[in-house]
Amino acid sequence: MNEVQSTAVSLLSRLRGLWRDIAGTDGAGKVPALAPGLPESDLEQLRVQMEACLGAKGGEVSARARAAALGRAYLSLSGEGRVRFLKLLASRFGPDRVRVDAAAAALAGAPDDTTRQRAEMDLRLALDPPRLKLLTQFNALPEGVKFLVDMRAELMGLTREHPDLLPLEGDLRGLLASWFDVGFLVLERVTWRSPAIVLEKIMQYEAVHAIQGWTDLKNRLDSDRRLYAFFHPRMPDEPLIFVEVALVRDMAGNVQDLLDPSAPLGDVDKADTAIFYSINNAQRGLAGISFGNFLIKRVVDDLSRELKQIRTFATLSPLPGFRRWLEGLLIKGEPGLLTAADHKALTRVGGMGAKGSLKALLAEPDWTAEPLLAEVLEGPLTRLAARYLSREKRSDGMGALDPVAHFHLSNGARVERINWMADMSANGLNQSAGLMVNYLYDLDDIDANHEAYSASGKVAVSARVKALLKG
């Protein structure tokens, strides 16, 4: 069972009783039992129920009952059945093509501005699919918005194999984007006194540095730490995105030191730096609906007001694609990848060609325990990491290749420092050879950095990183 299916099962267990009661408030919410795989005979019954939802017969109570019954039916289906459910919604409840063509022809032949404006309005209405009205009805149900967020998460995983579901996924994305406008979101500081259900969700959704139980979570919520999350009023127990912050003296360069539960409690009054060490998008179904930049700006504002001595705002971030990118270059044998000094040192310790030695040494699980190997690897790896962050672009040429770099650079940060052996966890070594990067949010330069990066892809880097690029 994959993550999306597990989420659906979990949601069903919470909603089974509640939505059953709503669906049973009158006869409108009664749907015949559907087989998990949704065979053709059941598919026709489902179509009738969907049309009933759109028919708007009865009042608000009947509409809620029909939506609750439809939601329960969806969650009770198998993976195959949910695909057929979604395909029915996509194919039978899209825009009326005859009406769209007629409206488009009327627009093309409009003889004057008044007629054109009327034709434009008619075309907009014709393009509005009935399924959007049906999906909107879930907003009135308890946890109905969460239901739609999880439905989109499942859709996103299906569209490659089933491209005919793309229009439905696009409709749902647009609907959620309007509901999750940043103006509707609430920023909250999560503390040890926050509701247990929220704390459990934080542990579940932390994907950057896994939380090792309640003791670890309590350490991350101590007085020298902060955790902020965006919430939506219709999903009050579900963090949408959250950031973990350490309040320290000077810029942190090692995540294990930062997360060490045995480390002494920091003196907040003496802290001069806020380190953002973990940012997590908690709802896969909201992918592409960006509010991470607003989160960082709001947290910086809150911390500046609370702790006026904090002058430096920076991250301690992973380079999730670095090892994959580097190994690709090594396989291709890119000329000029390593300097003459790199060739000499790597050949000496690796016993083969420099590129082969570099690849072989990185594959050794215990290279970090050998001081000589670590010393030899530091120079080429930090220099190549500087190149990866500042010069390598995505396939479309728009933005940094590394997704974390793209996020922070888009928000106006600067690549400040590359930290050697900063994350010695298995994941840190596998994805970035133990390297981490500090992105600095200099309040005086954020807007200029953002504009330069957005307009031309220019990456702001510190003098220290520029020196690495020069070798």
Image (cartoon, rainbow, N blue to C red):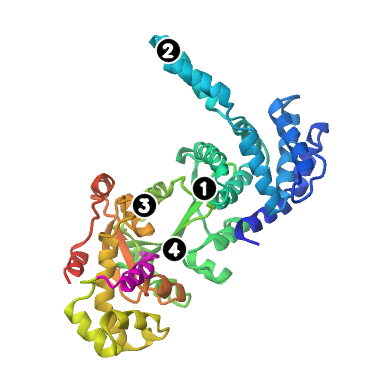
The residue positioned 20% from the left and 69% from the top of the image is 468
Residue 258 % position (x, y): 40, 71
Secondary structure under the numbered disc 1 in the rendered image: helix
Q: Which mark is residue 300?
A: 3
Can residue 253 be seen from the camera position used here?
no
The one nearer the camera, 429 or 121, is 121
Give the residue type at disc 3. Answer: Val
Which label belongs to residue 286? 1
Q: CA distance from mark 1 to mark 2?
A: 39 Å
Kind of residue at badge 4: Arg
Residue found at x 79% / y 41%: 41
First in residue order: circle 1 vs circle 2: 2
Which marked residue is nearer to the observer: mark 2 or mark 3?
A: 2
First to last magenta residue range = 316-334
> Secondary structure under badge 2?
loop
Crowd band around label 4 with a 10 angstrom C-alpha radius: few (<14), some (14–19), many (20+)? many
Please report whichever mark, 1 or 4, sits nearer to the chain's N-terminal start: 4
What residue is shown at x 31% (from left), y 60% (from top)? 439
Q: CA distance from mark 3 to mark 1?
A: 23 Å
Q: Which marked residue is nearer to the observer: mark 1 or mark 4? A: 1
**Toward the viewer: 332 or 323?**
332
What residue would you read off at disc 2? 110
